[in-house]
Image (spheres, coloured by chain):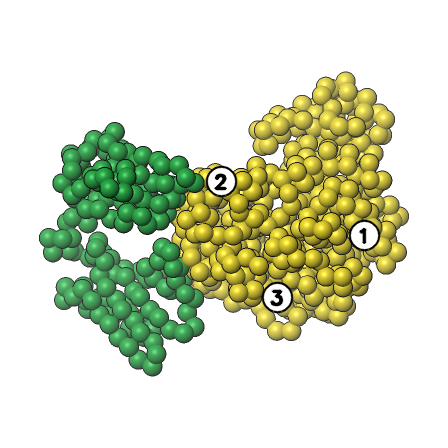
Amino acid sequence: MDIKEIKAVIDLMRKNSLTEFEYEKDGTKIRIRRGPDGEPQVFASSPSLIPTPAVLPIPTGLPLPVTAPTPSPTAPAATQEKLPSINSPMVGTFYSSPAPDAPPYVTVGSVVNAETVVCIIEAMKVMNEIKAEMSGTITEILAESGKPVEFGKPLFRIKPA
Amino acid sequence: MFDKILIANRGEIALRVIRACKDMGIRTLAVYSEPDHDSLHVQAADEAICIGPGPSPQSYLKIDRIISAAEVGDVDAIHPGYGFLSENAHFAEVCQSCNIRFIGPSPESIRRMGDKSLARENARKAGVPIPPGSDGPVQTEQEAIKAAKKIGYPVMIKAVAGGGGKGMRPAHNDVSLVKGFLAARMEAEKAFGNPDVYLEKYIEEPHHIEFQILGDKRGKIVHLGERDCSIQRRHQKLLEESPSPLMDSDLRKKMGRAAVKLAEAVHYENAGTMEFLVDGNGNYYFLEMNTRIQVEHPVTEEVYGIDLVKEQIKIAAGERIPSEFENLRPQRHAIEFRINAEDPAMDFRPCPGTINLYYPPGGIGIRMDSHLYGGYAIPPFYDSMIGKLIAVGPDRATALARMQRALDETIIRGVKTTIPLGQRIVRDQDFRRGKYSTHFLERFFEKKVQAAS
């Protein structure tokens, strides 16, 4: 598929509120999925493409940015994805609880203020308590406990107070 | 040998290091700033971790995040590239204490040779000629005047913590010396956090000639010939070549021996470069040492058929420098032109932007080291170099002809570049005859202005 065909497919998907499209031919496979915020994500694999990073995958394998049309989400799930997120201010390992057997700092529905500790990010053997930095209710937990996170990675979805 | 290396850099040099790692079967971890998300080095690496927003002090210079990324990624070694943290002794120390191999010299070597006036002192002790100068920094105007009288005008005022051509200004008499001395101290404090300046004799019509050094953990040091980097604009190199048109095998032997002696005296390990000023009479003077791999390393690679980045990795992993490296003769001639995203018509103002067409040159004897691709958006936070074009041939005339052909063939659309300037330089009669000094570009621009009027 060339870029024109891909753009045409994305347009068709948007017009018909489709969320997923997959195409395979001669060893080349393309999957286009409308992401949480309605933006299309293109996954392509072919033997000669530069492999995507393993630890923290970048959604598109192509070096060229795909210009996406602005979608008008109608599904109720879409409104949640427009909420702000608490992002990681550092590089390290995310932990949702202060200890392996302890309950998590926050769960979905937890009410937090700016000073509330929401998680720990461990870096160089130092456990850093991460604060919410805003008031609101946690609606989604986006990071997995024990897994590495990079700078800017969304950790929690929050509905501001 | 290392299993996995983190590349603490970006752009073309990050891609260069990743390529060497791939050649050696070593896995790679790239770190990147948010605007570099779509950068080629990020895509070429096996893994990538975002370490901050655009501005370097919040990303590529963030030692804690880079070390965290190294730990999260479980790497054995870090290659710092050039610029950024490559000559930061503290960073090298942090790597050491975290049991991560720093691919470069020891923190002590970086300190000893990174301080410009300390380096001169080491050179003097090793019997390597240095330009007559003040013995260490001058602290007052009176000291400066006294030192200048002893050295003899004209002199150059230089920042002790400077480098890369920054923090230097000439003085031709006491009046300009005092003015320059005070201004230089202020600039140095702002740019390097250290106001100390020293004085050096200002050598007329010099060639800037540097020697590539390699040292291993057993203390063996070799040199891999010279690079002539006299074509500079405001002390920023634009074009480099090897062998130097000024060099003959006797002078190369003498200077090579001096470079090795100095590196041995400071127990230098890994890749480094000794910079010299050479006048028209074969007199050479040590200027400074760069304790890292340099931008123009491909010139030496092509002339001697050696992969310098691979050698850096091998040395850091404990391997010996092969004995064949001791008596190498230049096999070919190589010229490198740095392509910058700058507008020559607007005093070389950097122009970041999006590349909408990229056609790199090719064919026999052409090498392009660049992270460009069609659609790539050059971020505004970093230096303006977008590629290095290297032309190689059995002799200078062939390399020159190929460089001319390659520059003419290259297409980069979407930003202004210095390619048109390169095209004019390679057609200049003086340059073609190998007759140039560090004043070449200055005069070249004057010629153009005169021709236009």
Q: Position of residue A65 (x, y in %)?
A: 36, 60
**Mark 3 vs 1, N-terminal side:** 1
Relative placement, left or right, of B433 versus B382 is right
- The chain drawn in green is A
Q: Which mark is residue B256?
A: 1
User: Mark 3, residues whose alpha carbon is within 10 Å: few (<14), some, or many (≥20)?
Assistant: some
Element at badge 1?
Answer: helix
From the viewer's side, name the closer residue of B23 and B101: B101
Q: Position of residue B32 (x, y in %)?
A: 44, 50
User: Mark 1, residues whose alpha carbon is within 10 Å: few (<14), some, or many (≥20)?
Assistant: many
Name the kind of residue labelled 1 in the image. Answer: Gly
The residue pinned by badge 3 equals B367
Residue A130 seen in the figure: yes
The residue pinned by badge 2 equals B63
**Mark 2 vs 1, N-terminal side:** 2
Element at badge 3?
Answer: strand
Q: Quadrant of the C terminus of chain A?
A: top left
Residue at 68% across / 63% down in the picture? B306
Q: Quadrant of residue B376?
A: bottom left
- Depth-wise, is mark 2 or mark 1 nearer the camera? 2
Q: Are marks 2 and 3 in contact (CB under 8 Å)?
A: no
- The chain drawn in yellow is B
